[in-house]
């Protein structure tokens, strides 16, 4: 997976006192910035914004396994936002995205993710937040074998007037993790 992981495996195999120790627990350096680790949101809106920032920070992280730290932190912040306000748009959005992400990896049911993403889309979102919601909504529908709903969500990702061209990019979107 990565050079860091290979070093971790070598150390765990060589030292008996390392038996049962995990990568996440003590060896893996955190990728979260100090600002992200030390954030102390107080309102549901602030927790929602933090969850959005954390989820978006996962994009482009390599190796991909390292992105899970951001998704996990985003999920935690989104749940806190929804605990304070069950209708917090960014909490709904990022919890739904994290549920789809987890569902892709663990083959989990997408019903909770679909509900959260559909609710989030009822609120005003920025263009990039709406794109994220529509992409993950389409992905969830695809995993649930609901092609009409998938295509309806993904068509909205395309520029106005070019929705007819979904067939040109559908397989690329399906293959995108």
Image: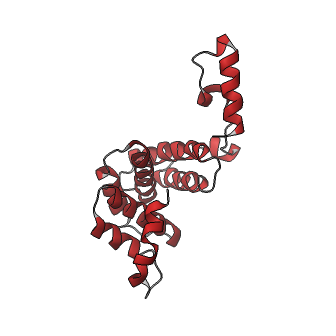
Q: Position of residue 86 (x, y in %)?
A: 35, 51
Residue 120 visible, this orientation: no
| Of 53 and 176, the residue lying toward us | 176
Residue situated furthest bottom in the rendering: 161
Q: Position of residue 4 (x, y in %)?
A: 70, 35
User: Quadrant of residue 20 in the image?
Assistant: top right
Residue 142, placed above or below residue 100: below
**Quadrant occupied by the N terminus:** top right
Left or right of 35 in this view: 137: left
Residue in the picture at 43% in, 57% down: 93
Residue depicted at 45% across the width and 44% down the height: 80
Q: Is residue 106 above or below residue 117?
A: above
- 113 in relation to 174, above or below: above
Q: Where, by quadrant of the figure, is residue 53 drawn?
A: bottom right
* 21 sits left or right of 92 in the view: right
**Residue 16 visible in the displayed image:** yes
Residue 174 point in image, percent of width and height: 43, 63
Q: Nearer the viewer, residue 75 or 166?
A: 166
């Amino acid at each position: 997976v990565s050079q860091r992981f290979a070093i971790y495996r070598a150390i765990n195999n060589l030292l008996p006192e390392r038996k049962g120790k995990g990568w996440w627990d003590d060896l893996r350096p955190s990728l979260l910035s100090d600002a992200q680790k030390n954030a102390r949101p107080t309102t549901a809106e602030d927790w929602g914004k933090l969850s959005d920032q954390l989820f978006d920070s996962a994009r482009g992280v390599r190796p991909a396994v390292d992105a899970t730290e951001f998704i996990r932190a985003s999920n935690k912040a989104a749940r806190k936002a929804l605990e304070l306000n069950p209708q917090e748009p960014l909490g709904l959005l990022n919890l739904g995205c994290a549920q789809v992400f987890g569902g892709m990896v663990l083959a989990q049911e997408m019903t909770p993710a679909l509900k959260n993403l559909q609710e989030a889309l009822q609120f005003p979102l920025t263009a990039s937040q709406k794109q994220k919601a529509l992409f993950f909504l389409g992905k969830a529908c695809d995993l649930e074998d609901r092609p009409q709903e998938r295509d309806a969500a993904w068509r909205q990702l395309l520029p106005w007037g070019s929705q007819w061209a979904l067939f040109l990019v559908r397989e690329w979107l399906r293959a995108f993790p």
